[in-house]
Image: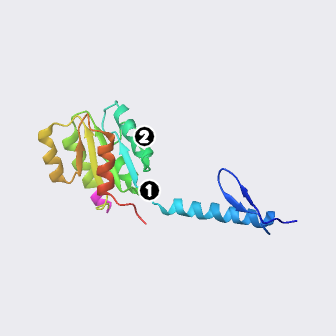
Amino acid sequence: MATSCFSFSTNCLLPTANLTIGRAVTLYFQLLTFNFLLIMSEAKIRVLLAKPGLDGHDRGVKVIARALRDSGMEVIYTGLRQTPEQIATAALQEDVQIVGLSILSGAHMTIFPRVLELMREKGMDDVVLFGGGIIPEDDIPKLKLHGVGEIFLPGTSTDEIIKYIRENVKPRD
């Protein structure tokens, strides 16, 4: 016997008048499907992070990776000792919108231009390249002339990096 009252729970208000179990289950799955589609429609920014060269210190890039992930971005970390060719290939295969390099070894004036060259050869003109690490301030304008979007020095807050990415990369449809 159906009643014309309401059942309350912590998550929903469910009218029970003339509502069968089958109909309730159907409505529940329709709501789940709607929520799933809503979440999936919010395209995430895809970020590739890499440690090129012989530098073996990756604590900083892991902190950045976690902060970007926690802010809702999809992060692919390629690991240590990546070549520019590996980085550009991974960026293409992963269909990322932005690539971040962490360089502490002093090879930034060679590695950044080479990664940019390879990305352009692969048709990734719309992919932003940024970086961070131990990079002399005098070299930053030169790197930007090559096409590097931004360089973040030690002490930069993760919020500043997240803000830069969100302002310079739009999620794809």
SS category of the residue bearing label 1: loop
Rendered location of residue 164, percent (x, y): 29, 50
Residue receiving disc 2: 66
Overall secondary structure of the magenta section: helix
Q: Would residue 124 be seen by someone viewing this image from the given angle? A: yes
Furthest residue toward front: 5
Going by the picture, which residue comes out furthest to the right? 1
Q: Which mark is residue 44?
A: 1
Residue 58 visible, this orientation = no
User: Residue 68 or 120: which is nearer the viewer?
Assistant: 68
- Is 43 left or right of 52, judged from the image as shown? right
**Span of residues in magenta:** 119-123
Taking the spot 67% from the left edge, 59% from the top edge, the residue there is 13
- Dot 2: element: helix
Name the mark on residue 97: none
Which residue is at a point 75% across and 62% down the rendered structure image?
25
